[in-house]
Image: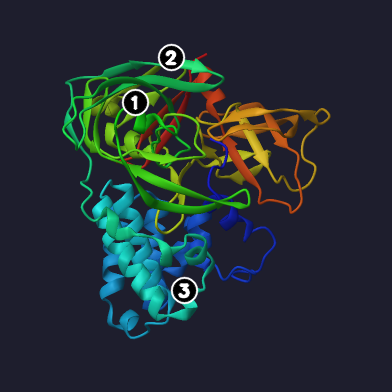
Amino acid sequence: MLCRTTVCSSLLMFFAGQSAGATTGGTVSEIEMALANANTDYLRMQGDRDAARALPARAAYFRTKGEISNSDKWASRCIEDAIVLAQPGSDALYQCLGILAGNRLWLGDIRGWAATMIKVRRLGASQPSLRASALYQEANIDGMQFEAFLDRPASSVTNVPKGIVEVPVKHLRDWPVISAKITGGGDGAKRDVNVEFLVDTGAARSFLSPGFARSIGLETTPGFVHEQRGGRIARTSLVDPVRLIIGGIELRDFSFAESDGVKLNIIGLDVLRQLGPLLLNDEVLRLLGPAWKHTGCTTPLRIASDPWARYWELRSPMKIDGVDRLPQIDTGLTGLLEVRGLRGEQGVGGSWQEAPVATMFGRVDRRVRMVQMPVVGNGMDGKIAVSVVEPVSPLPPETWLLGGGVLATRDLLVNLDSNLLCLRSRR
């Protein structure tokens, strides 16, 4: 989907011509910047430094590679390390706690995320330099009520049919849409509601549109995420847990998010991770299970995120116009390949045209021009039509996105347990 969090955009703005850390809103550490850019090479080099720098760098390095167990290992070692504990004012403990919290959230352990974020808040309260950091302030850590989520159960898969499961897909405006069922709930109600969802690999979390949760009798707990979006504060709540059934696979105690700004019902990465290895195109969502081994997909993905996982982006290495890129794979974005903040005039294309698009936040008006660029890597070899979004001041960071239009001609294969992502041509 179009960059939905100023978590994403505001952090990346620090990379567009700013020196590391120096902004009017506080500082951003180099490790936070590397996480946001999935800069695995930089983090690997930092892993050879002293413990106070190496330990958080290693935890972040394995996060960018999608290896959460290894990231947990280094983050846990960091918060117990004597050198790190001897420097309470340093970034190391703060960063490692944040990474550990984000890993818990990615794995569906909301209770563990909340408990660790309380430690992040406590550390920030005792250290003014940490409290003044840009991300700490942007996320309003001091004002968040993490205690409200300490009794939230972790979601789990309780029913998995044998063999491959196929769920039909409607392809609407380049969006893959599936039908799923919401049943039950923590209040004991006997819900049985069929719901259409946009399958959005660009969304870290799954959402219910405003008012839908209330229409089926579900309560929400505010204060799950705080962010700045388009000059205003956007707050995300967490809906009471329900059972979610997709193609016969049942997720128990699953908590959807809800935000006033999100206009659609969305299946995001928090659900897709639990569904296991999958194939997605414009006709079917195929849940592969053990059959994944027959796909031959071996291309590693990269993860871009902030420490506590408010956003989580799947990136795939490609060479675009002769330059190594890490475009985000975002099936919630209409169109095929898009770039924002393009540096320099690259390729030959037409004039600027008005191109309003539908997003999870409603309609967005912008101007684009189409440019043909060579793309090499991960099933995208050849000349590709690229939508270049007209830059506006201040110039945004250069960002590449591969949208839902790719599903019309290619299968998207994703295995989040093995950190693999491949695109396969069908025509």
Q: Secondary structure at mark 2?
A: loop
Q: Residue at x 70, y 33 (%)?
A: 365
Q: Residue at x 40, y 68 (%)?
A: 95
Q: Earlier in the sequence, mark 3 or mark 1?
A: 3
According to the image, what is the colour scheme of the structure? rainbow
Q: Residue at x 31, y 27 (%)?
A: 216
Distance, label 3 to label 1, CA atoms, is 47 Å
Q: Earlier in the sequence, mark 1 or mark 2?
A: 2
Q: Quadrant of residue 93?
A: bottom left
Q: Secondary structure at mark 1?
A: loop
Residue identified by numbered label 1:
295
Q: Residue pushed farthest bottom?
A: 86
Q: Earlier in the sequence, mark 2 or mark 3?
A: 3
Residue identified by numbered label 3:
131
Report the amino acid beneath label 1.
Thr
Distance, label 2 to label 3, CA atoms, is 48 Å
Q: Quadrant of residue 422?
A: top left
* Residue 283: image tag: 2
Give neighbour class at mark 3: few <14, some 14-19, many 20+ (Cα, 10 Å). Answer: many
